[in-house]
């Protein structure tokens, strides 16, 4: 009976080492760092062990192999007599001893596979951080106790790694693909809400989308002419209540400065508004090239103190105007967009009304389209139509892409105002 008890102890010890091996190897660094930051010292011990795992894994292999050998020796001696006695009830031939040995060997092997390897490792892979934290202290003490053997085998393995020019330590750099995979898993599990998922996904697009997707285009910029009368200025403010206005001399390509609405309001209250007073103009205008990404544009606003920026092309022609709110709105999406301001309106399960200036990334997310052809050639859905049709679109013209029909619904001059998008078979 003592030998059977010894087999049970060996199986339990093997299960403990197997759980430690899988738990410490599979524990996620990100989660461990959070736990360590909350004051969990054992989480920091696991991180330290993951950083230099050589001694630990050498100890694990020494222990598991020693247990396997002892299990084979003790198991054969412990079980063979019992198996022989049971087998002799039905068979007394010449192969009785060999059959008894084989059956006892299979029983011991099955017990070790099931209870010392398979079940413990499955438990550890399901709860890797919890397993690693509970067992890390014990494993470090055992490593210390067998340190001479650990030094020998770990030294040999390090030598072989150097000879083969393989890395000595694990590098765990978190990439964008890793974060996206975690987001997908969180969304499937339900721990990450749709708005949160969309917001984080939009942040990763900051370096891929140019500032042109968020700007107010040139033909929609409201500005004051230096020759405007007080009545014209007041009417523009009433029709378009902005905080700041550009002041130009004849056209947007001749910018004289900018003026705040509150400066004009003071003159209106005093009854002194007769036109644009040059003394109220701010000459410091922030100019940004249209080739900047949204990320670069936000960084530019960190340094500058201006509330808006004028966007120019390579020929120094004004093509648009952008504010910080515009850029934030381009990736905050529905979180800060009022229902009346939505650029994409769902009519039913198979059709949508989309404004021509809607960024192509918003269309992809709304319609679940993986990609548009030659995306770097345009920023908006109107740009896609022009690129696809190879001419300025006319009403009712359409194209087919990714199972959707994109049809021009409304034009203002040559500008595509609105499209009807319909899902087709």
Image: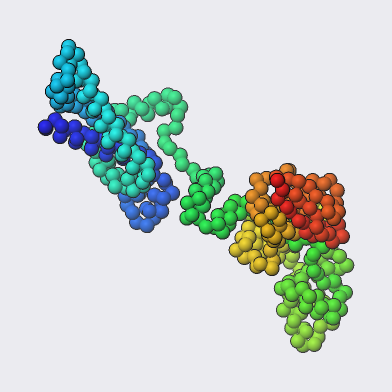
- Residue farthest along the front direction in this orientation: 90
Q: Position of residue 382 (x, y in %)?
A: 78, 54
Q: Is residue 390 left or right of residue 87?
A: right
Residue drawn at (70%, 60%) of the image: 347
Q: Position of residue 52 (x, y in %)?
A: 37, 39
* Count of residue discs: 0
Q: Position of residue 35 (x, y in %)?
A: 38, 53
Q: Is residue 94 above or below residue 220?
A: above
Q: State which quarter of the image contains the N terminus.
A: top left
Camera-side residue: 385 or 155?
Answer: 385
Q: Position of residue 69 (x, y in %)?
A: 23, 25
Q: Report which quarter residue 271 is drawn in.
A: bottom right
Q: Is residue 224 left or right of residue 42?
A: right
Q: Is residue 11 above or below residue 397?
A: above
Q: Is residue 221 above or below residue 183?
A: below
Q: Is residue 93 visible?
A: yes
- Residue farthest along the top direction in this orientation: 94
Q: Is residue 417 above or below residue 163?
A: below
Camera-side residue: 254 or 34?
Answer: 34
Residue drawn at (82%, 78%) of the image: 235
Residue drawn at (17%, 20%) of the image: 90
Residue drawn at (26%, 31%) of the image: 112
Which of the colour schemes (rainbow, by chain, secondary structure, one colour) is used?
rainbow
Q: Report which quarter residue 81 is drawn in.
A: top left
Q: Is residue 262 left or right of residue 22?
A: right
- Residue farthest along the bottom direction in this orientation: 270
Q: Is residue 356 visible?
A: no
Camera-side residue: 104 or 415?
Answer: 104
Q: Is residue 89 left or right of residue 232?
A: left
């Amino acid at each position: 009976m003592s030998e059977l008890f010894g087999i049970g102890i060996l199986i339990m010890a093997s299960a403990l080492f197997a759980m430690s091996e899988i738990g410490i190897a599979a524990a996620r660094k990100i989660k461990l760092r959070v736990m360590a930051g909350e004051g969990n010292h054992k989480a920091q011990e696991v991180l330290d062990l993951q950083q230099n795992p050589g001694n630990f894994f050498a100890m694990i292999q020494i222990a598991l192999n020693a247990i396997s050998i002892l299990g084979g020796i003790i198991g054969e001696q412990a079980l063979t007599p019992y198996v022989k006695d049971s087998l002799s009830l039905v068979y007394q031939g010449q192969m009785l001893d060999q059959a008894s040995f084989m059956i006892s060997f299979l029983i011991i092997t099955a017990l070790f596979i099931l209870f010392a390897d398979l079940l413990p490792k499955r438990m550890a892979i399901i709860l890797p951080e919890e397993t690693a934290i509970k067992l890390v202290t014990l494993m470090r003490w055992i490593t210390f106790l067998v340190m001479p053997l650990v030094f020998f085998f770990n030294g040999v393995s390090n030598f072989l790694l150097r000879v083969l020019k393989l890395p000595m330590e694990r590098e765990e750099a978190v990439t964008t693909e890793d974060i996206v995979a975690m987001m997908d898993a969180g969304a499937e599990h339900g721990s990450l809400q749709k708005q949160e998922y969309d917001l984080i996904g939009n942040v990763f697009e900051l370096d891929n989308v140019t500032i042109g997707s968020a700007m107010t285009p040139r033909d929609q910029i409201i500005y004051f002419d230096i020759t405007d009368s007080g009545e014209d200025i007041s009417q523009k403010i009433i029709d378009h209540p902005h905080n700041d206005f550009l002041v130009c001399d004849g056209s947007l390509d001749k910018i004289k400065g900018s003026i705040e609405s509150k400066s004009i309001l003071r003159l209106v209250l005093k009854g002194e508004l007769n036109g644009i007073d040059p003394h109220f103009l701010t000459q410091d205008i922030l100019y940004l090239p249209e080739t900047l990404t949204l990320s670069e544009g936000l960084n530019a606003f960190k340094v500058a103190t201006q509330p808006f920026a004028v966007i120019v092309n390579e020929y120094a022609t004004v093509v648009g105007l952008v504010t910080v709110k515009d850029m934030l709105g381009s990736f905050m999406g529905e979180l800060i967009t009022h229902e009346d301001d939505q650029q994409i309106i769902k009519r039913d399960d198979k059709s949508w009304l989309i404004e021509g200036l809607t960024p192509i990334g918003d269309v992809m997310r709304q319609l679940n389209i993986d990609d548009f052809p030659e995306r770097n050639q345009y920023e908006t859905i109107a740009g896609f139509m022009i690129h696809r049709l190879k001419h300025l679109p006319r009403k009712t013209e359409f194209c087919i892409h990714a199972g959707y029909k994109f049809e021009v619904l409304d034009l203002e001059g040559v500008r595509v105002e609105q499209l009807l998008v319909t899902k087709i078979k």
